[in-house]
Amino acid sequence: MSETRQYPEWMGKMRGLTPDELTEFLAGPVVARIATVDADGFPYVTPVWQEWDGEGMYIIPREKTVFVKHLLNNPKVAISCAMDNGTYTRMLMRGVAQILSGPEPMTGQVLEIARRMSIRYLGEHGPEYLAGSQDRPRYLIRVTPDPDKKLITWDGVEWAEKYTAAT
């Protein structure tokens, strides 16, 4: 039987996140990096604003965003979200992107999600930014985790046991 090692608080939780912790983490101004595959088969990574609903992630790219063309050919994506300081909280998701609407000016559900995102990422100036750009055509995309691929989360600076355990 292996011992449970105690870590100092500054090292983080030293485990994966619970669903509630993941929701709390992604409710902050965490930029997602979406990886798509371009026409030549190369990975293409783009930072995007995101909104997690507990089961999937919404993104609202501009009409001329290059990676939307990639999604039309191959909807499989990977998304990475991380705090690049502190305890390095992070999430990695592989899934399938679905274009729900667009390109069109933001209204309805798209506008509501965009409002929340603008405040999360720009604070008090979010509504000001949004007012000046809501008539510009956007897509609404939802990425759902692939049920056959594990959603990977972690909070902590020490290596997970799987990396240090004897094989």
Image (cartoon, rainbow, N blue to C red):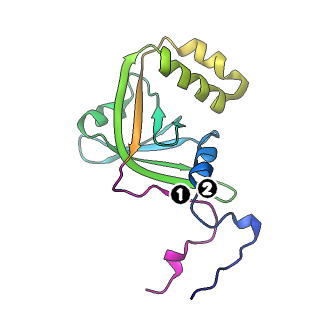
Looking at the rendered structure, the kind of residue marked 2 is Thr
Q: Residue at x 59, y 29 (%)?
A: 117
Q: Residue at x 71, y 76 (%)?
A: 6
Callout 1 touching callout 2 (CB < 8 Å): yes
> Disc 1 versus disc 2: distance between alpha carbons?
8 Å
Q: Residue at x 52, y 42 (%)?
A: 54
* The N terminus - image quarter: bottom right
**Is 79 in front, or is 84?**
79
Bounds of the magenta segment: 146-167
* Mark with earlier residue (1, 2): 2
Q: Position of residue 157 (x, y in %)?
A: 64, 66
Answer above or below: position of 86 versus 40. below
Query: Is residue 144 found left or right of 125 in the rendered image?
Result: left
Image quadrant assignment for residue 7: bottom right
Residue 159 lies within the magenta run: yes
SS category of the residue bearing label 2 = loop
Name the mark nearer the viewer: 1 or 2.
Answer: 1
Residue 155 lies within the magenta run: yes
SS category of the residue bearing label 1 = strand
Crowding around mark 1 (Cα neighbors within 10 Å: few <14, some 14 to 19, many 20+) is many
Q: Residue furthest right?
A: 9
Query: Is residue 7 found left or right of 109 in the rendered image?
Result: right
| Residue wearing tag 1 | 153
**Is 113 in front, or is 53?**
53
**Is 104 in front, or is 15?**
15
User: Principal SS element in the magenta part?
Assistant: loop
Image quadrant assignment for residue 29: top right
Looking at the rendered structure, the kind of residue marked 1 is Thr
Answer above or below: position of 137 versus 67. above
| Residue wearing tag 2 | 89
Q: Position of residue 125 (x, y in %)?
A: 69, 22
